[in-house]
Image (cartoon, rainbow, N blue to C red):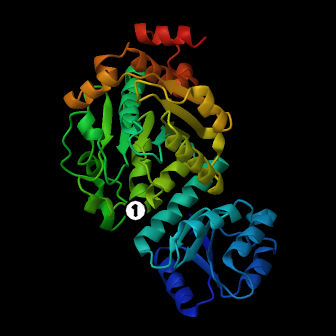
Amino acid sequence: MEPKHIVVVEDSEITLFKLKSILLRLGYTVTTFSNPINALDWLDKPGNTPDLIMSDLKMPEMDGFEFVRKVRLLPATASTPLIMLTSNVEMENKITGIQAGADDYLSKSVSPTELDLRIKALLSRSQNTEGTLSQAVAKSISVFSLRGGSGKTSLSVNLSIALSQLWGIQVSLWDMALSSGHCAALMNLSPKNTIATLHDWPAEPADENLFAQFLLKHETGVQLMPAPVSPAEAELVTPRTVDLVWSYLQGNSSFLVVDAGSHFTDPVMTILERSDYILLVCTPEIVSVKSAQDALEIFAQLGYNLGKVLLVFNNIYPTQWLPAKNMTAVLKNRPAFEIPYDGERFVRALLNGQPLISTAPKSEAGLAIISLAYKLSQKQMDSEKKSLSSPLLDWIRKVQI
């Protein structure tokens, strides 16, 4: 197999030499340019189509944003994976770069190992898009809210169990609420190891036994990748960690559910961008609705497909301060799903470490979560398990008609 060809555009000769040396050592073919205009002239010539492009942000005559826009206008490179490199990785620059057409955004101080992993991840996604890879992967569902205390962790846990029990399958649950992950507590599980220890892993691991050290098995058929046990460890989880774990979890279950926390960190944004569905959780009060509005705006700025976003109105209060129809109107009539109030059972489940779906699946809230699980999995699973029958599954199929 021929080595992948990477074009690097960087005005600093020192940085350019360093990047070229690293990429050559990693086994790539490299073409370099210190001027973006010269790079565009080269890319516009027939036959000059690299597998990936890397571009600096601040360059003479044309900045990286404009360079990316022009690259996307060339037919041959309209969909070529593109990474922006900069010493400034602030959110505003990342949003601008992605809006311009970049696929990823890395600091110039990135380690060779992480750089290689991010390149491989982009090349793999590009191949999947082109249909050159046929490996089946789990459908990924991320549960997110910019408002803490929305019940997203409880939803993530119960949704995972509902998917597993509906179809009799193994489901992966990944707790990415890095500084305050509680999925293990809600399932009465005790983590011994966490993925924070992978922060300095020397190369992409292929040994499944490695991940077995982190995964916790639950009696319902859910396997949990727990969050770090302390805020200090949370700092060690990076987009590189996501790259290491993502493909393994997707390849070892039918569905991957992620508790994506309440903050737009780089690892979380990496996951949200890759997810097949994003469940944006909103509670019936003004601050939560405003947070959901903000999240939707950021999703749009980052170039996420808003068609994969489903609002979940979680009634965590005994009194519904804002009716669902009012929240739907404020949030531009996006598709929404409502979970009724069932505070007593959820609190009991939290105290006992026994999720609601395990103890009261036919409660109003339990049936709502099971209905949501069916809505998210029906298209895939009905074709695979059309003949499967159980009282719960038969009931859901009837009420969904």
The image quadrant of residue 335 is: top right
Disc 1 target residue: 238
Foreground residue among 168 and 375 = 375
Foreground residue among 257 and 49 = 257
Looking at the picture, how far across and down is residue 285, in whole percent?
A: 50, 36
Looking at the picture, how far across and down is residue 386, in whole percent?
A: 53, 15
Q: Residue drawn 53% across and 40% down? A: 286
Looking at the picture, how far across and down is residue 340, in whole percent?
A: 45, 22
| Residue 251 at least partly seen | no
Foreground residue among 310 and 72 = 310
Looking at the picture, how far across and down is residue 101, in whole percent?
A: 69, 63
Q: Residue drawn 76% across and 83% down? A: 37
The 10 Å Cα crowd at callout 1, few under 14, some 14 to 19, many 20 or more, is some
State whether residue 121 is above or below residue 40.
above
The image quadrant of residue 205 is: bottom left
Instruction: Give the quarter of the figure containing the N terminus.
Output: bottom right
Q: Residue drawn 54% across and 73% down? A: 28
Residue 243 is left or right of residue 131, and the answer is: left
Foreground residue among 283 and 256 = 283
Q: Residue drawn 64% across and 43% down? A: 306
Instruction: Give the quarter of the figure containing the C terminus.
Output: top right
Looking at the rendered structure, the secondary structure element under dot 1 is loop
State whether residue 185 is above or below residue 56.
above
Residue 55 is left or right of residue 176, and the answer is: right
Most distant residue in the bottom direction: 13
| Residue 134 at least partly seen | yes
Residue 146 is left or right of residue 10, and the answer is: left
- Amino acid identity at mark 1: Thr
Label tally: 1
